[in-house]
Amino acid sequence: MKQVASLRYGVIFKKAFSDLEVFKGFVRDFLAINLEIERVETEKSFSEPVGKVASRYDLFAEDTKNRVIVDIQHVRHPDHYNRFLHYHCAAILEQAASFNEYMPPLTVFTLVVLTSGDKHQQDISVIDFDPKTLAGKPLHEIAHKVFYICPKYLNETTPQPFQEWMRA
């Protein structure tokens, strides 16, 4: 793994993670996706806001199959789960070309790094959009996901591929 500066500093985080190889490595280790990208955009926003809130993404990249967003949050806000869920949904809805197109061409993954921790004190939490049966069996219809990553709560049960990144 390429050496990077601490995730705890926004400017350094954006500079380090906008490097193609670092970004692709981070995505590969967390999502098991090999992105085929030529650049990582910083401070990305869409020309037209989706809903009443204009979303802005720290790091943004997409290839022909996936749209990946990485955000870093230093301040603990009581609404951060809802805030990043809104941003994530905006990245899905922005892809709609017409009012009757409901299947976006790109799968959206959002990785949120919460550097100051979280009231739930979990290393990684995931919002999985895939419908499940009452028995919990996934239907494999919707792949969009939001990951909340809290390096402060890294522990021995955190999956190995994530640990190096969370220690950075």
Image (cartoon, grey):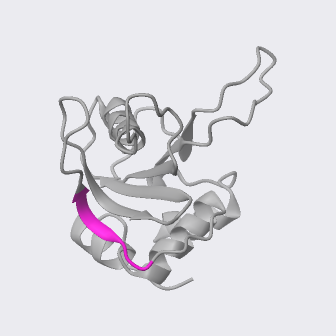
Identify the residue at the far top of this view: 134
Q: How many numbered discs?
A: 0
- Report the residue at 22% width, 70% height from top: 11
| Figure check: 101 above or below 113 | above
Residue 22 located left or right of residue 44 = right
Identity of the residue furthest to the bottom in this view: 2
Instruction: Give the answer, above or below, for where 8 lies relative to 149.
Output: below
Considering only vertical position in the picture, is 129 above or below 7?
A: above
The answer to if 41 sits in the magenta stretch is yes
Q: In the image shown, does 101 or 33 lie closer to the viewer?
A: 101
Q: Which percent across, then down, holds residue 12?
A: 27, 74
Q: In the image, residue 51 lies at what x, y percent?
A: 24, 30
Residue 57 quadrant: bottom left
- Residue 88 in the magenta stretch? The answer is no
Indicate the quadrant containing the C terminus: top left, top right, bottom left or bottom right. Answer: bottom left
The one nearer the camera, 89 or 84, is 89
- On the rendered structure, is 157 left or right of 16? right
Q: Which residue is at 49% across, 66% downward?
A: 63
Q: Residue at x 75, y 30 (%)?
A: 139
Q: Is residue 37 left or right of residue 32?
A: left
Image quarter where the N terminus lies is bottom right
Picture quadrant where residue 25 is located: bottom right
| Frontmost residue, 51 versus 162 | 51
With respect to residue 78, does 91 lie above or below? below
The image position of residue 69, as x and y in percent, is 40, 56
**Left or right of 6 on screen, residue 65:** right
The magenta span reads: 38-44
* Residue 127 on image: x %, y %: 54, 35
